[in-house]
């Protein structure tokens, strides 16, 4: 079955529970982490109240590749979901993406959710000598091609589900929403306050209905956190560095970091009210203690 | 802190006094290039909400401001010799000059240094300020100096306006519409104090040129407007205060601060004057910035970030409403045939902030009149203005008559389809979905896409109507469905063209079949989707064949008992592939101009009209824009709709996009409503519109405002 049995004329049916699931990010874009931390982090998260482990993707930065990170996490865990939020599609050839995703899916027994988008940075494309201008069309073609690879099975390995993992598509342009509605199983939002999430997913749902897709897309959200007094400045410094490419916007992202239990509770509630199916909270400080603090707030 | 404020308008002065009051140790200088008493324009308007914020922020200026306030609760719409008054609103206004005096006085009292007739170049004379506030208006030099960082976008509007005063006191926010030989002029007027009113005159630029105002002096312009609105001025005079003709510029900035510089008010953002929020937003900015500096004392960057994060979402909402409002006034001449009561309702609901429900709360009498008028016209009665107000249903419950068919109400539902047909014979879900739809009480229920031929199917599971047994199956469905309600039943007929031979939509849309596909035809040999089949350019013989398929299906649909037939000329299917220049590269008389491109769809329409029972209406679903560069735009869409109407189309379902994969669609709340408005009121044809309409209030608002005749309610997804 594909993502989400539908809503038809206002009656909600199918697997949409009222309760939002909450996942946690792996610190794969926090500079200087090692394999030990990834494995410990994944195990600790699985033992906690989290339903998924998320990873981010970037080329020109001191980060670990998202699929490599998920491979480590897959081997160290057995039930928790694994999700790319997102992998930048055009950075890899479609067949390579299909192969990597199928591999994680096989290693994890079908726990992968593949989030794809075009990303936000020119330098990712420049670093890899990939044409930036055609990125939207390339991603559209990849979404078609990846599914074909999974269905054909020639590339291998066999995915847990016949059609391959659930595919989420991100982006905030009209093209992105149309692409998601045509080829995706759900929408992955890029982050921001609950109001921004509600606005974007409203458009995603409108695109879905307009395109004539039956059912409803899954809706995934994400946010950043740094809990505990010692973490606040470290988290802000990391976000300013990671988002330096956005110029002055980096300050806003840093200021929006969830640094208090109250802010976290409000944020989670806001996303739940906005109809989010799964919210993944990404650490800005790569310290295992952050998982304990987050778990306490969510409990 | 050493603070230099550039610009002594309301934003700059108010910020300066609030910051100084909060922290007397701040050294604040406001520099202004104009003289102290120089100002332009007349009054500025405030809402109740803003007043609350002003009271909180500084009681003394609040008291002084409200002392000379003009306050009123009504909106008058003067149109076609009639005035429609709406009550229950809350406005207050003050003369801009008086406001500035009050703020200047308070600044002086608190020890803010005011320096007039001084250019920005002098900033260096203040040493290195800790903070430079750019409150220097729409043409902000501070913003222009650091354009690379602020990344402003400037959108120049297409109407001309002049900000006059008048020595009379309006009793209401007054909109006046006056027809001239050159075109339509409008006035936005409201009281300012006990003697004067603001009197803004606005018209589209071509009208302004035709009236010879492009070469007119200030005096000539005053004389022209005074004569034009003599009846409204009742012997009073127009006043000019540097009241020159201008084009409004909407300013948006990606960021509002940079280092120790921050933008405030119009320098950072403007909102079209027709929602009267410029000064309000500017003064709220000032409050927010002063508070953020206090809260984050010692961390300027954090304070400026917080200010921006607090204000930007609010400003975004107002700019959105202002855009809607400005668009309304730019296109207002299309409502010239409206009855005054509907004209007024349309005006009041133009920006989306006031809806049918909200107006009901503010002014139940007027909504009663609107609903009464709507119900009376829907019954075919002559206008008996409000006589039925007490018992009138909201517009969505008024019936809708087309030819010999009457829909019991204005809500339509479209069956999504289940792709469960076999060889085109409708599957079990076809009936179930229609029954479910009829049970909701909707007035019109549309089937899923039904193909006219096997190769016109979208997927192997698409329903069809090309064989007699299929006709009988549909007749059986119609009979079953009728037992559950009084909705009129519409069959949606189409030919998929190059969007055919795809998999079930549960697996994604436009994914080509791996096996079992069939050859596709389209206007030209251009595939629709990546990895999609290249269609054959359809030839004349096949076009005749397709046209006859439509006719044959229409005859069977009539026999099956459908009340309404809708031909799908939208979303990139075969007829739409002719209409869009992006999918039609034909060299024959079916390619080239819009007239040529729409020729084949019109041939289908005419042939079907001749075969479809006279008393039953015929609708067409049309993508009025391709949402893509080089494609059909809304103007073309309106022209296409006009041709459809002339060839016998009774109703247009307004759609957009899906004609090409390379589109940039614009999704949002009611994203098709503005297109429906244009088609309905520029062509004069009834419209059916969907596109993320999710509430009854939205339906009532669209209908009462005359932006659509029937609404497809999208199932509540949220």
Image (tube, rainbow, N blue to C red):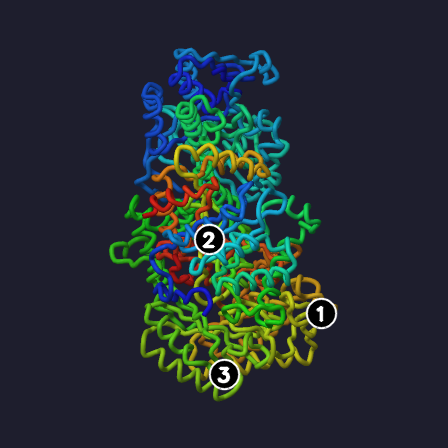
- Mark 3 vs mark 1, CA separation in Å: 37 Å
> The disc numbered 2 marks a residue on which chain?
A
Q: Which residue is mark 1?
A: B589
Q: Which of the chains bears the disc numbered 3?
A: B
* Residue that numbered label 3 is attached to: B422
Residue drawn at the location 64% of the way across and 80% of the way down: B544
- Does the image show residue B369? yes
Q: Which residue is mark 2?
A: A53
Q: CA distance from mark 2 to mark 1?
A: 59 Å
Q: To which chain does the residue with label 1 belong?
A: B
Marks 3 & 1 on one chain: yes
Say if mark 3 contacts mark 2, CB within 8 Å: no
Name the residue at the front extreme.
A36
Q: As displayed, is residue B479 above or below residue B564?
A: below
Numbered disc 3: secondary structure: loop
Q: Secondary structure at mark 1?
A: loop
**Viewer-closest of B569 and B641:** B569
Residue visible at 48% across and 13% down in the picture: B114
């Amino acid at each position: 079955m594909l993502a989400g049995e539908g809503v038809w004329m206002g009656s909600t049916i199918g697997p949409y529970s009222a309760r939002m699931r909450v996942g946690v990010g792996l610190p794969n874009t926090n500079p200087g982490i090692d394999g030990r931390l990834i494995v410990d982090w994944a195990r600790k998260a699985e033992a906690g109240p989290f339903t998924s482990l998320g990873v981010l993707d970037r080329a020109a930065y001191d980060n670990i590749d998202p699929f490599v990170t998920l491979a480590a996490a897959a081997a160290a865990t057995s039930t928790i979901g694994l999700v790319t939020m997102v992998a930048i599609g055009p950075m890899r050839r479609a067949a390579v993406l299909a192969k990597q995703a199928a591999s994680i899916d096989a290693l994890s027994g079908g726990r992968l959710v593949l989030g794809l988008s075009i990303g936000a940075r020119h330098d990712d494309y420049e670093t890899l000598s990939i044409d930036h201008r055609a990125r939207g069309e390339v991603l559209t073609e990849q979404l078609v091609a990846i599914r074909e690879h999974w269905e054909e099975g020639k590339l291998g390995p066999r995915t847990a589900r016949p059609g391959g993992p659930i595919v989420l598509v991100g982006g905030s342009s009209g093209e992105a929403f149309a692409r998601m509605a045509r080829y995706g199983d759900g929408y992955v939002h890029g982050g921001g306050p609950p109001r921004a999430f509600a606005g974007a997913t409203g458009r995603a749902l409108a695109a879905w209905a307009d395109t004539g897709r039956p059912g409803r897309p899954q809706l995934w959200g994400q946010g950043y956190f740094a809990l505990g007094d010692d973490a606040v400045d470290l988290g802000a410094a990391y976000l300013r560095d990671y988002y330096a490419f956005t110029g002055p916007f980096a300050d806003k992202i840093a200021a929006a970091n969830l640094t208090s239990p109250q802010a976290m509770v409000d944020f989670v509630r806001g996303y739940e009210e906005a109809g989010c199916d799964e919210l993944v909270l990404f650490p800005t400080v790569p310290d295992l203690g952050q998982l304990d603090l987050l778990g306490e707030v969510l409990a | 802190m050493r603070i230099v404020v550039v610009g002594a308008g309301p934003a700059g002065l108010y910020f300066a006094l609030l910051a100084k009051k909060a922290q007397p140790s701040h050294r604040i200088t406001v520099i202004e290039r104009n003289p102290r008493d120089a100002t332009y324009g007349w009054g500025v308007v405030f809402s109740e909400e803003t007043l609350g914020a002003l009271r909180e922020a500084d009681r003394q200026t609040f008291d002084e401001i409200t002392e000379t306030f003009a306050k009123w609760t009504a909106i008058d719409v003067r149109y076609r010799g009639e005035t429609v008054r709406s009550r229950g609103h809350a406005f207050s206004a003050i003369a801009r000059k008086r406001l500035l005096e009050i703020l200047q006085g308070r600044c002086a009292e608190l020890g803010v240094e005011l320096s007039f007739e001084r250019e920005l170049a002098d900033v260096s004379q203040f040493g290195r300020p800790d903070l430079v506030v750019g409150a220097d208006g729409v043409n902000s030099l501070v913003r222009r100096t650091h354009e690379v960082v602020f990344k402003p976008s400037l959108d120049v509007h297409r109407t001309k306006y002049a900000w006059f005063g008048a020595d009379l006191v309006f009793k209401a926010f007054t909109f006046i519409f006056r027809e001239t030989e050159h075109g339509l002029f409008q006035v936005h007027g409201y009281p300012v104090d006990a003697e004067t009113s603001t009197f803004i005159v606005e018209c589209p630029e071509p009208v302004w040129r035709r009236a010879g105002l492009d070469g007119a002096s200030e005096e000539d312009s005053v004389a022209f407007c005074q004569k034009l609105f003599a009846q409204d001025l009742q012997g009073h005079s127009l006043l000019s205060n540097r009241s020159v003709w201008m084009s409004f510029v909407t300013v948006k900035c990606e960021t509002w601060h940079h280092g120790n510089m921050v933008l405030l008010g119009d320098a950072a953002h403007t909102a079209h004057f027709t929602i009267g929020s410029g000064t309000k937003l500017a003064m709220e900015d000032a409050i927010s910035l002063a508070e953020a500096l206090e809260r984050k004392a010692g961390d300027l960057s954090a304070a400026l970030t917080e200010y921006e994060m607090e204000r930007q979402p609010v400003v975004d909402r107002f700019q959105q409403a202002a855009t809607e409002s400005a668009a309304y006034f730019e296109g207002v001449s299309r409502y010239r045939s409206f009855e005054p009561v509907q004209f007024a309702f349309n005006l009041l609901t133009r920006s989306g902030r006031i809806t049918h429900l909200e107006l009901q709360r503010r002014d139940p009498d007027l909504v009663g009149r609107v609903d009464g008028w709507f119900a009376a016209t829907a019954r075919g009665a002559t206008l008996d203005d409000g006589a039925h107000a007490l018992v009138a249903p909201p517009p969505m419950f008024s019936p809708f008559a087309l030819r010999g068919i009457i829909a019991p109400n204005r809500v339509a539902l479209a069956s999504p389809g289940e792709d469960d047909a076999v060889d085109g014979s409708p599957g079990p879900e076809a009936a179930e979905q229609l029954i479910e739809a009829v049970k909701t009480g909707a007035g019109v229920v549309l089937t899923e896409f039904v193909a006219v031929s096997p190769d016109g199917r979208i997927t192997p599971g698409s329903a069809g109507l090309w064989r007699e047994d299929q006709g009988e199956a549909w007749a059986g469905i119609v009979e079953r469905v009728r037992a559950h309600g009084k909705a009129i039943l519409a069959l949606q007929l189409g030919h998929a063209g190059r969007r055919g031979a795809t998999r079930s939509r549960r697996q994604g849309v436009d994914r080509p079949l791996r096996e079992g596909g069939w050859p596709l035809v389209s206007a030209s040999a251009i595939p629709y989707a990546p990895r999609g089949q290249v269609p054959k350019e359809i030839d004349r013989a096949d076009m005749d064949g397709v046209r006859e398929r439509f006719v044959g299906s229409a005859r069977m649909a009539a026999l099956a008992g459908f009340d309404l037939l809708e031909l799908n000329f939208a979303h990139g299917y075969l007829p739409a592939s002719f209409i869009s220049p992006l999918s039609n590269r034909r060299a024959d008389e079916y390619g080239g101009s819009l007239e040529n491109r729409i020729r084949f769809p019109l041939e289908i329409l005419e042939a079907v009209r001749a075969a479809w029972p006279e008393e039953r209406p015929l609708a067409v679903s049309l993508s009025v824009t391709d949402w893509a560069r080089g494609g059909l735009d809304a103007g073309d869409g309106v022209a296409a709709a006009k041709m459809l109407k002339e060839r016998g189309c009774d109703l247009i379902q307004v759609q957009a996009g899906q004609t090409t994969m390379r589109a940039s669609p614009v999704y949002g709340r009611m994203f098709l409503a503005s297109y429906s408005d244009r088609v309905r009121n520029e062509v004069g044809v009834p419209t059916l519109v969907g596109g993320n309409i999710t509430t009854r209030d939205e339906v009532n608002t669209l209908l009462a405002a005359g932006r659509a005749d029937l609404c497809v309610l999208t199932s509540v997804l949220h």
